[in-house]
Image: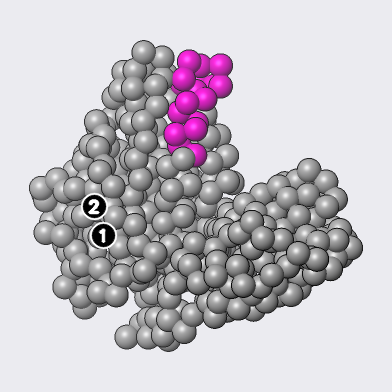
Amino acid sequence: MASAMSEAKSPLAQPFPAMPQIAGVTPRIARAGYKDWGRCDLTYVELAEGTAVAGVFTRNVCCSTEVEMGREAVKTGSARALVVNAGNSNAFTGYRGREAVEQIMNQVAQHLGCDPSEVFVSSTGVIGVPLPLDKAQAGVAIVLQAAPCSWEDAARTIGTTDTFPKGAAMQAVVGDKTVTLAGIIKGSGMIAPDMATMLGYVFTDAAIAPAFLQELLSAANAKSFSCITVDSDTSTSDTVLTFATGKAGNAPIESFDSPGADAFAAALEAVCNQLAHLVVRDGEGAQKFISIEVTGAVSDDSARRIGLAIANSPLVKTAIAGEDANWGRVVMAVGKAGEPANRDKLAIRFADKWVAQAGLAADSYDEAPVAEHLKGKEISIGVDIGLGEGRATVWTCDLTHGYISINADYRS
């Protein structure tokens, strides 16, 4: 039984890709009824014994119990199952929220004969409402016996305000073996780069040491999920987990000295990047996908912070929504970022057209081609700070009335 998503699909939506099965990974879905909707809202993924796990989590200090317990469990490096609840974030729910998570972990652990710490739980949806114990217990009982489902059905089931299912897959050659990675993600609003996604999961059949998997995921996150923003709001539940079953039969990847380590790291980063971009493309009310490239900063970190100041500016985002070539708003955003910048060295471009150079409007500036570029769905902004070698690219979307409509009606 597949679950339905919003009828109004984002104009930036991408088709769900062909997604291979991963040896040692079995996804299933069911309907627990966490909200009054006619769709599946419970995802269960069973993982083979010996599966390694790594994770990155929200920096929001009002995080959910699921995040707190996940942070601790991921340190063991071992996983047997993933459970994702949609429609209820179970955040800011005190002991009742923790009781629900522990109940799910114990129920699944008893079924698999594993330690409860090997069961990872995520929840997403409305904040402040405890996950109902009866619905959780009944839903888990159903999903444990459900037939395996497709990646697309699993991606739909973890969604909330998403308008299309999101997935990505890659392969890499590790030694004499080909390993496969497949990832799904949900996210549309409450997206900001304090880790940045809502909920994302990458599965691979590669054999890899948990500590090195954590190193690679953290590095990939820094260039993907932590470089996107829809609305500057950081969720209480943000989680990205990577599970490696080891079923590909490769010699375990222990470090960058291991054969194929570079190839696997590149594949993981590529999957994370694709998933991060899909979240932005489904930004609530989004009509345009915006890439912001910052060069010439004093460091890469400084470039990223400047890029995010631009990406999070409501004035920049609404100007792009209105297809207004108001590059003065970009100047403003650079200046407010709190990073080293020199007005008289600053240069700004839209696509390949320089609109400002050396602190002034460019002599060659012609607004017509810039205005034409802003009519498209893929918008490119470049900013050169002129002070150093630091560079970064961040991604965002425009800000439209659709964002207000979705979030004003979110709980209804």
Q: Answer above or below: position of 198 versus 224.
A: below
Q: Residue at x 66, y 73 (%)?
A: 367
Q: Is residue 212 highlighted in magenta? A: no
Q: Is residue 264 highlighted in magenta? A: yes
Q: Answer above or below: position of 143 versus 370.
A: above
Tell me, yes or no, whether the two marked residues, 1 and 2, touch with CB atoms within 8 Å.
yes
Q: Is residue 318 visible?
A: yes
Q: Residue at x 76, y 70 (%)?
A: 331
Judging by the rendered image, the residue that carries numbered circle 1 is: 156
- The span picked out in magenta is 253-269
In the picture, which quadrant includes the N terminus? bottom left
Judging by the rendered image, the residue that carries numbered circle 2 is: 152
x and y percentages locating residue 180 in the rendered image: 33, 31
Q: Which mark is residue 334?
A: none
In the picture, which quadrant includes the C terminus? bottom left
Instruction: Identify the element where label 1 is drawn.
Output: helix
- The three-letter amino acid code for the residue at tag 1 is Arg
x and y percentages locating residue 178 in the rendered image: 33, 22
Q: Nearer the viewer, residue 59 or 396?
A: 396
